[in-house]
Image (spheres, coloured by chain):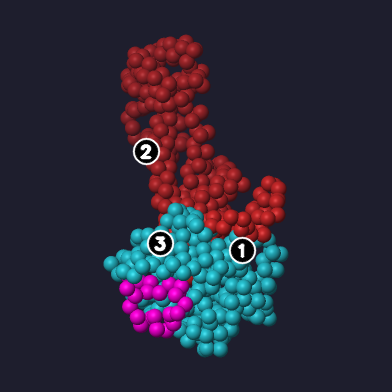
Amino acid sequence: MSLLFNGRTGDNTTRRVGFFQRVFMGGINHLRQALASLGELWRSPLATFMTIGVLGLSITLPSTLYLMVKNTEKVTAGWEQAGEISLYLQSGTTEQQANQLLLAVSSMTSKIDSARLIAPDIALEEFEALSGLGDSLAYLDKNPLPYVLLITPKPQYLQPESAKRLLQELEQQSVVDFGKLDIEWLEKLYAIVSIAKDIVWIVAILLCVSVVLIIGNTIRLNILSQREEIAVMKLVGATDNFIRFPFLYTGFWYGFLGGLLAWMLVAFLLWWIQSGVENLAGLYQAEFTISGLDMQALGVILLISISLGLIGSLISVQKHIKEIEPS
Amino acid sequence: MIKFDRVSKTYLGGQQALQQVDFHIEPGEMAFLTGHSGAGKSTILKLISLMARPSVGNVLINGHNLNDIKLSQVPYIRRDIGMIFQSHQLLMDKTVFDNVALPLVIEGYSRKQIQKRVSAALDMVGLLHKIQQSPQALSGGEQQRVGIARAVVNRPPLLLADEPTGNLDPKLSMEIMRLFEDFNQAGVCVFVATHDLGLIARMKYRTLTIKQGRMIDDGLNDQNDPLSTLSDLHDPNLPPMTKLPPKYTL
């Protein structure tokens, strides 16, 4: 195409080529440029490796934290169903009163699955057996434990909100001192997990910004080191886009390789932690495997790191390639 | 082909490089632009190749006003102009082939076309046997010829040269000029800025002379010897010269 001279065309445009062939050739061209950029990275292995290392580590930290939080959630998700309400009766309640309450509560069949009364004597025995304080408990002159009513609500009353309402209703009953929902501690755990999640997000955002800045700066240095070459290319008629693409591909490769490294590092870290987690799970008579590092996670990590690489290089390229003009 | 219409150029900082420069170079013409260092030769070439824009006035190429050219169109303009520099502006870490091929790669020629045209261009400047060497291994004259091959490889209708013989001895300079003559005979409009008056004197071509940013002789007055006009002060109040240059055919 010539703006100044009508009819002056390069040989590239004189032959008519089909649309698909043009698209195909364009694709081949981009592939060639992408590989050329990769080759450029290969030519300075140390600098490339250091940049990719920084990127990989930056992405590893939030990825690992994220998987930890995800796994904690998975563990606690099963616990929610174990919701039970313990009603502690006033001290001095007679066995008759307690049984009356048991009957009253059991009759609320729409809300309650089952109810069980634990007499103070039985509770004390249980406590002796579990706590190992048997001998010292013998010094007590009278049993300090109250009657306890253990209530398992219907499944629809297991959610924190509705369980709380049921608890309030039960506390209205006579002779009840107070009730305890055994998901309260779960709520506290959830609160802690949600703070942890926030922290993961903050760390992730900060590190993603730093990845963008690192890639932006690396590409800036690349551009400046090729200042003369860029000026010559502009001199012989290269468009900004033509000059831009190799640098964008460099950013792409940084992101891709950094993401790959991050994935490998996360896999290594999880493998490392796994034995400790197994040990801990064993103490609770449970089996637990850290999960989440599957192909989908790899995809997400690569997608994020490649986007960050492209954003970083785009910022640099937009700013600096325009500045370089032949003189 | 190239027309300057009362062009003035003031650089940032107030340095006035050109004042009211008027000239016209016909299609297919070969012309020299001469003057002392700092007289404004490079500025004129920069205005043609859009490395600078005029402060006042119009520069036209083939009837198109360069003031109308948007920034994004500048690369396409430069593809129509072959440019040759004193410092030849070669990429020293690439081979001679890659250097000459650059304009074609940028325009998206096929591999086969590039191969063919680069070989042809290097053959024209007599450097086909050095196609795979690095420019660093070449002499100054050879480097300059590689620069010329790159400038003509996509067959631009217009060739600009800024002090192309600046670092060369008279014999090599003459060889370069003969190359330009060959291109001119093939129909290319050639415009050479040089302060090598001896070289110009040996070649009978139109010579424009610039002094302190003013065109003191646009070379259309044949009686004037370029060597003497350079020392004369042109009176801007004189009526414009009307004599036309010999017509060239493409």
Identity of the residue drawn at 47% across and 15% down: A111
Circle nearer the viewer, 3 or 1: 3
Nearer the observer, B23 or A264: B23
Asked whether residue B216 is drawn in magenta, I would say yes
Q: Residue furthest left?
A: B14
Asked whether residue A251 is drawn in magenta, I would say no
Callouts 2 and 1 in the same chain: no
Mark 3, Cα crowd under 10 Å, few <14 / some 14-19 / many 20+, is some
Q: CA distance from mark 2 to mark 3?
A: 112 Å
Identity of the residue drawn at 46% across and 66% down: B24
Q: Which residue is labeled 2 in the image?
A: A136
Q: Position of residue A22 (x, y in %)?
A: 67, 51
Q: Position of residue B158 (x, y in %)?
A: 55, 67
Find residue B105 and name its label: 1
Q: Name the secondary structure under disc 1.
A: helix
Q: Chain of mark 3?
A: B
When the figure is inspected, residue A102 is found, relative to residue A197, above or below; the finding is above
Callouts 2 and 3 in the same chain: no
Q: Name the secondary structure under disc 2.
A: helix
Find residue B5 and name its label: 3
Residue type at numbered disc 1:
Val
Where, by quadrant of the figure, is residue A148 drawn?
top left
Mark 1, Cα crowd under 10 Å, few <14 / some 14-19 / many 20+, is some
Q: Position of residue B81 (x, y in %)?
A: 54, 65
Q: CA distance from mark 3 to mark 1?
A: 35 Å
When the figure is inspected, residue A254 is found, relative to residue A137, above or below; the finding is below
Q: Identify the chain drawn in red.
A: A
Q: Which residues are magenta?
A: B214-236
Tell me if I can see residue B1 in this picture: yes
Nearer the observer, A32 or A102: A32
Residue type at numbered disc 3:
Asp
Q: CA distance from mark 2 to mark 1?
A: 92 Å
